[in-house]
Amino acid sequence: MAVTSYRRRWTLDDRAESVWHSLPVDIPADCPGLLVTLTVPPVEGAVIDIGCEGAAGWRGWSGGARQTFAITPEAATPGYVTGELEPGTWWVVLGLHRVPVEGVELLVEAVTGPVDTIPGLTEYADASAAIAVPARPPRRTLPASPGLKWIAGDFHAHSLHSDGSTPIANLAALGLSAGLDVLAVTDHNTVSHHAELPSLSKRFGLGLIPGQEVTTDTGHANAFGAIGPIDFRQPAATWVGEVANRGGLLSINHPLGGDCSWRHPLPEHPPLAEIWHSSWLDHTWGGPIAWWQAWGLEGTTPIGGSDWHNPTSITPPGSPTTWIAVDASAEGPDELPAATLEALAAGRTALSWSYTAPVLVRADDELIALDAANSLVISPDGTRHAIRTDRAHLPASPGPHLLITHTGKLLSTCT
């Protein structure tokens, strides 16, 4: 057993140099495990993240949710990738998310050798085993174009693999209870959760989409698809091409989300944007739509995300609901995730505030407003169409349409 320790005071100068700092740890051949502990004193204003990069690539991230983790060939703390510890130089990565004016002294201890107890693992397994498969509510069938069908999804949720409070099994149970067909699990700066998704998809009959919330202090983006980790330490301008080259899809997250608002310069826009985020509580506030218009209505497919972390989250999974027009032949949890990503790439979405809320969908060359009597549809050219019944049809022009109440409250949008 060997111990590598780093004790140092980190200052605003260090944060100005870089948010991310890496501390080397030597991993010998046939190493049975790595146990890392970060000690942060109770100093007001200090928010420190932690993660790990192996000699052969990224191994995981705790952010500020945990201050100790372990990796072995057989198991790892949630948030970290299980597997052989390749010999060479590894790195404990610190994120200086917030540093007080007077600085903060941190202690990092990395122990190589046998690991008796994997932090967080038993608790995770026990919580997962306690989750039962709930009943799905009655299905809502929306009119669709020939060869397509509308399914319900949520593209933003977190588990104990990052800063969520629950295992992925509970996310699946909550999604199923909300009527969802697909749910993206988008833990911060890690893909350790991807290994769980296939078996849980089968168990719950819900298509779990692999994702990563690429997280920085000046904006977050979701990378969808089983494409491996995207390095959040690289400039955001590189994420778009990297995700696309690997066959995934990138989305700007909560672009008006407080201190997480999107502030990265992007010469090339990704295909998706999380226009509908759970933090949009006042539906008469036009900020998200104004951002979408300024960002570019054409070429930006809107999606929605609950950003669910724990029972105190603002909204449950499925609020808002993203409706995706997928290939009608795609069935079951094995096929729906891939069909969903194909439909997102084609720009076929509609959004509503929940599974049962009023919604506007496109079918052939028509728009159909459902459960939205006495509302208005706004076409891309600004033309308004009165909706008087709970099922109204009108000609569809190209581009996004908005469904609003007579008081200006946004109900739905359809691409």
Image (cartoon, grey):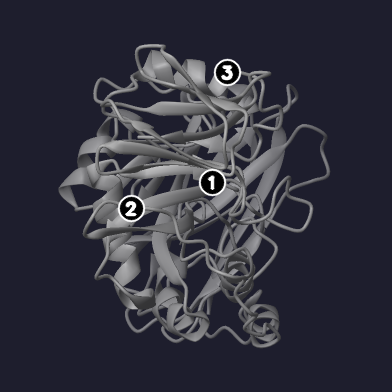
Numbered disc 3: secondary structure: helix
- Disc assigned to residue 305: 1
Q: Is residue 117 left or right of residue 243?
A: right
Where the C terminus falls, by quadrant?
A: top left
Q: Secondary structure at mark 1?
A: strand
Which is more N-terminal, label 3 or label 2? 2
Task: Kindly indicate the quadrant of the structure image that contains residue 148.
Answer: bottom left
Residue 216: percent from the left, percent from the top?
A: 49, 36
Regarding residue 93, the answer to whether it shows in the image is: yes
Q: How many angstroms separate mark 2 from mark 3 (CA)?
A: 30 Å
Which numbered mark, 2 or 3, is in the foreground of this view?
2
Asked if marks 2 and 3 touch (Cβ < 8 Å), the reply is no
Q: Amino acid at mark 3?
A: Gly
Q: Position of residue 315 (x, y in %)?
A: 70, 48
Q: Nearer the viewer, residue 34 or 329?
A: 329
Figure label count: 3
Q: Amino acid at mark 2?
A: Ala
Contact? badges 1 and 3 (CB < 8 Å):
no
Residue under numbered circle 3: 287
Q: Amino acid at mark 1?
A: Gly
Quadrant of residue 264 in the image?
top left
What residue occupies the far front of the structure in this picture?
389
